[in-house]
Amino acid sequence: MVKAIVGANWGDEGKGKITDVLAQESDIVIRFQGGSNAGHTIVNNYGKFALHQLPSGVFHQHITNIIGNGVAFSVENFVKEMSELEQRGVPKPNILISDRAQIVMPYHVAFDCYEEERLGKNSFGSTKSGIAPFYSDKYSKIGFQVNELFDDDECLKEKIRHAVEIKNATLKNLYNKPEISVDEIFNKLMEYKVALEPYVADTFSFLYEAVKSGKNILLEGQLGALKDTDFGIYPMVTSSNTIAGYGAVGAGIPPYEIKEIITVVKAYSSAVGAGEFVSEIFGDEADELRRRGGDGGEYGATTGRPRRMGWLDLVATRYGCRVQGTTKIAFTVLDVLGYLDEIPVCVGYELDGKQIDYFPSTTKLKRCKPILKVLPGWKCDITGIKKYEDLPENCRNYIEFAEKEIGIPIGIVSNGPSRNDIIYR
Ligand code: GDP
């Protein structure tokens, strides 16, 4: 059976932890989109890890971890993360890299930085991992698939020549930055080739057989529905589709095989980078939630930047879950809210003086103001509780209120960062 784990919000919902937990019963874990611009934080017996490029199944020896064709694949980060696992005593994971995955080129990272610099105060708040330039090149058909590294050197050089010509025109005329050479790019790709050789595979055929033989397959999404290129808060989105439906494309499996879509919803909101965030809070209220949030504060796993904070936005979350095609919700970081006497949640938006309950497109979203409802807090630490019935009544009421508003069952509650802090309903 194929399951997807994806996010309903702006990302950082705790997908890494839920994937790590559910991975235990999976044969295969696949990353199908995005790149090292976001990180999944996982806490387990080996310690605390921020995975940017590797699938979250790497801590389990029985799992085949796949970097799918839809990923923006950074060889440098892949090598770095693999060596970190080794240094910290994690047994060597089983990894396959799709021969159709495309490579984040050194100049993609440079272009990401130059463009943000050029935009100045209008910048996207990019993580500068090269993701937007990467996907632009992919769809302009000047990207490099992993299989091309193993082709004839002259063919590869010819293609590099073509790309470098375009890149240098922009470097010189738009950014006024040093130009790049064909040899420097070719030599880098040859280094990548050596690093990747043990892992490259025809993952499409591998997955075709795996699906046919009924293996348990987990698609691991990165970021959340509100950052999806099509359905998110465009243009302040990521450059790939973060929705489960894209799993079929980015991994290469039939869409009708994705039977379960577990969408991770955060019990409050956080966002990194610019863009619409209706239930955002500021000042001391935000600082306190940021300090207490997640595992050791709400700071970006990739950049260390303080995250923007807000209350649970049920309008955005309902939309995010619908866009994902959610069959079940995993509700995370609920323990963090235990300090509050009262917990505001956003139950509607006011748009041009009228109340709406849907999540509009960006131009209208910019004019929306939150309509809040205040729920009573539970004022205690719920970490360590194993049974749903043992949660304080106000905490259960909070969960059940969210569930009713979203309209999809909350099947999993996460009440702490570690693997064991999990309650099934
Ligand atoms: P992801 O990208 O969706 O995997 O999310 P991140 O890893 O960026 O952010 C989630 C953060 O919250 C990580 O530091 C996790 O260890 C932590 N976390 C996940 N679930 C819980 C939870 O239920 N409670 C607490 N306190 N922290 C959690």
Image (cartoon, helix red, strand yellow):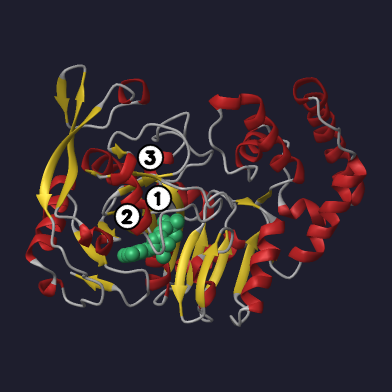
Q: In this view, does 177 lie above or below 13?
A: above
- Which is nearer the N-term, disc 2 or disc 1? 1
Cα distance, mark 2 to mark 1? Answer: 9 Å
In the rendered image, which quarter contains the C terminus?
bottom left
Which amino acid lies under the numbered mark 1 shown in the image of this protein? Answer: Ala
Q: Please identify, in this view, whether the residue under mark 2 or under mark 1 is nearer the observer.
A: 2
**Dot 1 and dot 3 residues touching (CB under 8 Å):** no
Q: Residues within 10 Å of mark 3 (few under 14, many from 20)?
A: many
Q: Name the residue under label 1.
A: 244
Q: Position of residue 217 (x, y in %)?
A: 44, 67
Cα distance, mark 2 to mark 3? Answer: 13 Å
Side (left or right) of 263 relative to 202: left
Q: Position of residue 262 (x, y in %)?
A: 32, 58
- Which is nearer the N-term, disc 1 or disc 3? 3
Point out the residue furthest to the left here. Answer: 393
Which amino acid lies under the numbered mark 2 shown in the image of this protein? Answer: Thr
Q: Position of residue 165 (x, y in %)?
A: 85, 29
Ligand 1 under 8 Å from disc 3 Cβ: no
Asked whether residue 151 appears in the rendered view, the answer is: no
Which element type, helix, strand or loop, lies under badge 2? Answer: strand
Using the image, tell me which numbered label, if any, was put on residue 226: 3
Q: Residue 399 is drawn in which quadrant?
A: bottom left
Q: Is residue 340 above or below residue 90?
A: above
Residue at x 37% of width, y 60% of height: 294
- Pick the residue in front: 254 or 366: 366
Which element type, helix, strand or loop, lies under badge 1? Answer: loop
Which amino acid lies under the numbered mark 3 shown in the image of this protein? Answer: Leu
Using the image, tell me which numbered label, if any, was put on residue 345: none
Q: Name the residue under label 2.
A: 263
Residue at x 61% of width, y 42% of height: 131
